[in-house]
Amino acid sequence: MKVEVCVTSVEAAKIAERAGADRLELCSELAVGGVTPSAGLLQAIRDAVGIPVHVLIRPRSGGFTYSEHTFSQMLRDISYCRELGFDGIVTGCLHADNRLDRIGMGHLAGACADLHLTFHRAFDRIPDWESALLELEAIGVDTILTSGQAASAVQGFSRLEELVQRTGCGIMPGGGIRPSNLEKFIGKGFEAVHLSALEHPEPELFLGLPLNTPGLLREGTPLLPDAGMIETVVRAIKAGLK
């Protein structure tokens, strides 16, 4: 089981790499749920770290239903990430009623080609998740990032276990993962665990709250991961999987 850490800067990426993270998810503006990083940040990260980096392709906050023009932008962003040599893409698209946009997702998967493709937590909004599982697997999605359709991965654990049994896609729990609850996830067949390991604000603030909650939008407070938390998670997973 891998440890994926979500980062929004070169500083955060270096902290996570030094702490032993297996791979990074790179985005910007985590306080609004994450959006596609800038060209400058992509280039800087490419030069700064050696571990695999998966890039979030989400052109804006405010849901996962996109116009034709916005969709074209997403395809161009994926193409640019391919040119820079990134290892994977994290993305997703839904219809206005939260059904999986299978056609749109198929186009995104086609643009990714041989890159690792993760469908992000838009999955947690899909009412008919059973059908979506089959469709995502058929499209070629490698990993699904999900909290088990609950406010946190701990609360959604029973659904997460069910997902592992029902799909060939790798299941990556995310949402409130920390050392105190990690034991629950070790040895259960998950492809990876996903965490931000934020120093500031405290991770508890994220549980059950949308990431655009006003209290999280703090000027002058960079979102950096806690190296000690990542190191603890990595050690626990290595020990538990021996």
Image (tube, grey):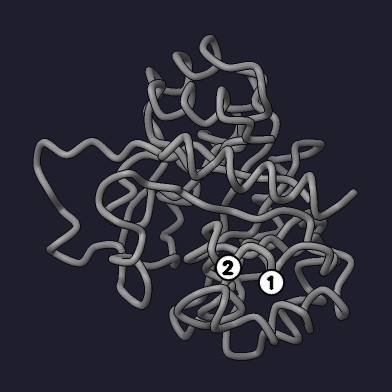
Q: Which residue is found at the position 82% from the left and 56% from the top?
A: 140
Give the alpha-carbon distance from disc 2 to disc 1, as whole Å.
Answer: 6 Å
Give the residue displayed 89% in from the left and 66% down from the top: 168
- The correct choice, above or below, for 131 with respect to 194 in the image is below
Instruction: Give the labeled residue for mark 2.
Output: 181
x 50%, y 65%: residue: 175
Rendering quarter of residue 84? top right
Dot 2 crowding, Cα within 10 Å, few <14, some 14–19, many 20+? few
The residue most toward the bottom is: 128
Picture coordinates of residue 184, whole percent (x, y): 69, 71
Q: Secondary structure at mark 1?
A: helix
At which x and y percent is residue 119? 64, 59
Q: Does residue 180 appear left or right of residue 30 in this picture?
A: right
Find residue 30 and name its label: none
Amino acid type at circle 2 is: Asn
**Name of the residue lying farthest toward the top:** 47
Q: Secondary structure at mark 2?
A: loop
Residue 124 percent across, percent down from the top left: 55, 77
* Residue pictured at 77% horizontal, 79% vertical: 161
- Horizontally, is 204 left or right of 57 in the view? left
In this rendering, would 63 be left or right of 126?
A: left
Q: Is disc 2 in contact with disc 1, using a CB cutoff of under 8 Å? A: yes
Name the mark on residue 184. 1
